[in-house]
Amino acid sequence: MASFKPTKVQFLPKLGEKVTEDTLYWKNYKSPVQIKEFGAVTKIDFSPLAPHNYAVTASTRIHVYGLHSQEPIRSFTRFRDTAYGGSFRGDGKLLVAGSEEGLIRLFDISGRVALRQFTGHSKAVHVTSFLSDGFRVVSGSDDLTFRVWDVPSAVELSSITEHTDYIRALAPSKLNPDLFVTELFFSSDVLFYDSGVCVTGGRYVKIWDLLKGGQELVSLKNHHKTVTCACLSSVGNKLLTGSLDRHVKVYNSSYKVVHNFDCDASILSMAVAPDDEVVAVGMTNGVLSVRHRKHKKDKETLTSRRRRGPSYRVFVKGKNFVPRQDDFLVSKPVKQYLRKYDKQLKSFEVSKALDTALQTWTRTSKPEVTVAVIIELNRRGTLKNALAGRNEESLTKILNFLLKHIFDPRFSRPLLTVGDIVLDLYRQVLHQSPVVERQLQRLMEVLGREAELQQELLQVLGILDTLFASLTPRKEVAALAALPVDQGPQLQAA
């Protein structure tokens, strides 16, 4: 599912406009992240409980997104026709939705198959919701009926037939599970607002007081096209409205517009996360626009990045980034680089490869690496070429390495081969360098002592072999004497 970011829009106060705390609060959002859906986004609903995932109803499917994910973490696609009104239950574990075919489906968020299917409407069901008790579902349909369903048994509990037009909006009360409000086709959205009801219709937003018998409190006309959706924020209970004029307007407690969000297309649906961390807007062009609230950490990180040069942002971008819980991570395999002596061996630079393996740190801390390079050169038949043509300094390194490790049982065999080749190559020029001559003489003495030691060990080994061979018959005789008498014929036959 493709996602992209539009050009950042900066909102500046008009000349003479007073910037209030409410204005600053709603300006504190990042540039919108836009997610392309499969059709017009007709409904957005946030889960009441953390982590506040939100369901997006568009075309024939419902996608559930995490707060910081741009790909759906769950998809419900079991609709044969257009889906409508996906809404969460109070615990965020169940989701109900209507459809163009007149069916109502109940889903478990952790699964994909519908748990319940409510049948009874004869036309499209555009609005569905859970009542506050969590055990009943309400639905409004184009068949002019409003029905209440029992979730455990999937049985219709009641049906209201007083409507004279299509039912396109409803709002259940959070305090009274038996109280809900419905709207007809000529209205766009409805919600409970404190002790009253907020209804949008045409270009107007009207609020009535239920405690005063439905007295109209205020009538707002700040949009110049039809108002399609409305919602309330959790902080200060601020009212937000969206319209076909592509604007989202935020009102304060005095019903004055304190902020305005611009969108790229006409708005059909809108929702605010329970903690005001996210504002999600659905549009007619199938784009879901998501704005996240900025935090002090984000501001400090942004400020520290801006202080660095542009080269840091280009070449070290994302070095200190910590992924969020719902992020999809794409890991790239770490490229393995060859060691310098491996590259030189591939390039047939045998003398340089041996010099690299004889560098101070390698030959002192990793002698096995140096010996491995020598073994590889010998396997290729180029060890003599790598040892030939040496000056006094490089030959001294080789001889010092031989003197230190030639008697190590791990390295003795390949290093003896190196000693033989060095003696063959430089026997005629030993007198030209006193240093090399002394080292070779010392090497000869050490090898001579080692040869004597090996000869003595071989003699001891021969004596031990003789002793073991002389002891073997006695053991066999003792073993035969210990056997029972009746086994004698069997042994003779064997």
Image (cartoon, rainbow, N blue to C red):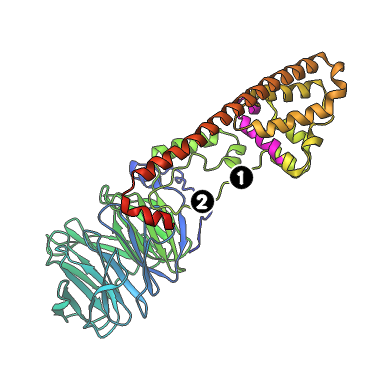
Name the spot of residue 240 as percent of width and height, x first.
32, 56
Give the image quarter of residue 136: bottom left
Query: Depth check: 276 or 470 in front?
Result: 470
| Residue 169 in view in this figure | no
Query: Depth check: 233 or 153 in front?
Result: 153
Asked if residue 273 is among those painted magenta in the image, a careful observer would answer no
Q: Which residue is depicted at the point 25% across and 51% down? A: 237
Under mark 1, the amino acid is: Gln
Q: Secondary structure at mark 2?
A: loop
Relative to 264, 344 lies left or right = right
Under mark 2, the amino acid is: Ser
Relative to 85, 490 lies left or right = right
Near mark 2 (Cα within 10 A), the count class, few <14, some 14-19 or many ≥20, is: few
Give the image quarter of residue 202: bottom left
The residue at which mark 2 appears reads as 331
Count of numbered circles on the image: 2
Asked if residue 373 is among those painted magenta in the image, a careful observer would answer yes
Q: CA distance from mark 2 to mark 1?
A: 15 Å
Which comes before the other along the chain, label 2 or label 1?
2
Name the spot of residue 450 as percent of width and height, x first.
66, 23
Q: Secondary structure at mark 1?
A: loop
Name the spot of residue 255 as percent of width and height, x first.
29, 53
Q: Which residue is depicted at the point 47% across and 46% down? A: 12
Residue 344 sits above or below residue 441 on the image: below
The residue at which mark 1 appears reads as 336
Relative to 335, 15 lies left or right = left
Name the spot of residue 451 as percent of width and height, x first.
67, 24
Q: Magenta span covers which residues?
A: 361-376
| Residue 468 in view in this figure | yes
Near mark 1 (Cα within 10 A), the count class, few <14, some 14-19 or many ≥20, is: few
